[in-house]
Amino acid sequence: MPATEIEVTSAGTVAGNELLVPTGKQGITYDHLQDWLGPKLKAKASPKDISKKVLVKGIKQWAVFEEKAGARTLRTVFKIT
């Protein structure tokens, strides 16, 4: 299942989940989500899957990962097609 990296902005919370709204900008498309996740795990970056804690408006299938980047938390959102 192809996965396309997308940019989103937060729009508050709905039913206890954070609502993310796509900005329209799309990034790299991977043949499978594991193509992005595999190298991260090998580098011991251990991204955490938070897909059940967020909603992405207008997208039926998504995956959201969070990882530490120094003092910041980096979020990566994928649209699964």
Image (tube, rainbow, N blue to C red):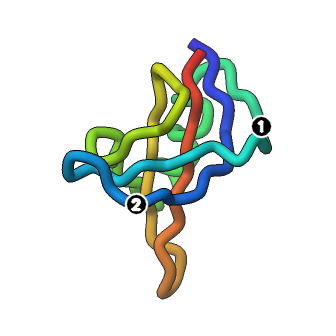
Seen in the picture, residue 34 relative to 20 is either above or below; the reply is above
Q: Position of residue 50 (x, y in %)?
A: 33, 48
> Do the numbered discs 2 and 1 sit on residues whose CB atoms are within 8 Å?
no
Seen in the picture, residue 12 relative to 39 is either above or below; the reply is below
Label disc, if present, on residue 60 of the rendered structure: none
Q: Position of residue 31 (x, y in %)?
A: 67, 19
Residue positioned 21% across, 46% down in the render? 15
Residue positioned 49% across, 49% down in the render? 20
Is residue 50 found left or right of 43 in the rendered image?
Answer: left
Q: Which amino acid is tagged 1?
A: Ile
Residue positioned 52% across, 40% down in the render? 37
Residue density around tag 1, few if under 14, some if 14–19, many if 20 or more, within 10 Å:
few
To which residue does mark 2 refer?
A: 12
Circle 1: element type? strand
Q: Nearer the viewer, residue 21 or 69?
A: 21
Please name which of the two marks, 2 or 1, marks the residue nearer to the observer: 2
Quarter the N terminus occupies: top right
Residue density around tag 2, few if under 14, some if 14–19, many if 20 or more, within 10 Å:
few
Q: Which amino acid is tagged 2?
A: Gly
The tag earlier along the polypeptide, 2 or 1, is 2
Q: Position of residue 19 (x, y in %)?
A: 41, 49
Task: Choose top left, top right, bottom left or bottom right for residue 81.
Answer: top right
Circle 2: element type? strand
Q: How many marks?
A: 2
What's the distance in space between the residues labelled 2 and 1, CA to CA? Answer: 26 Å
Label disc, if present, on residue 28 of the rendered structure: 1
Task: Choose top left, top right, bottom left or bottom right for residue 39.
Answer: top right
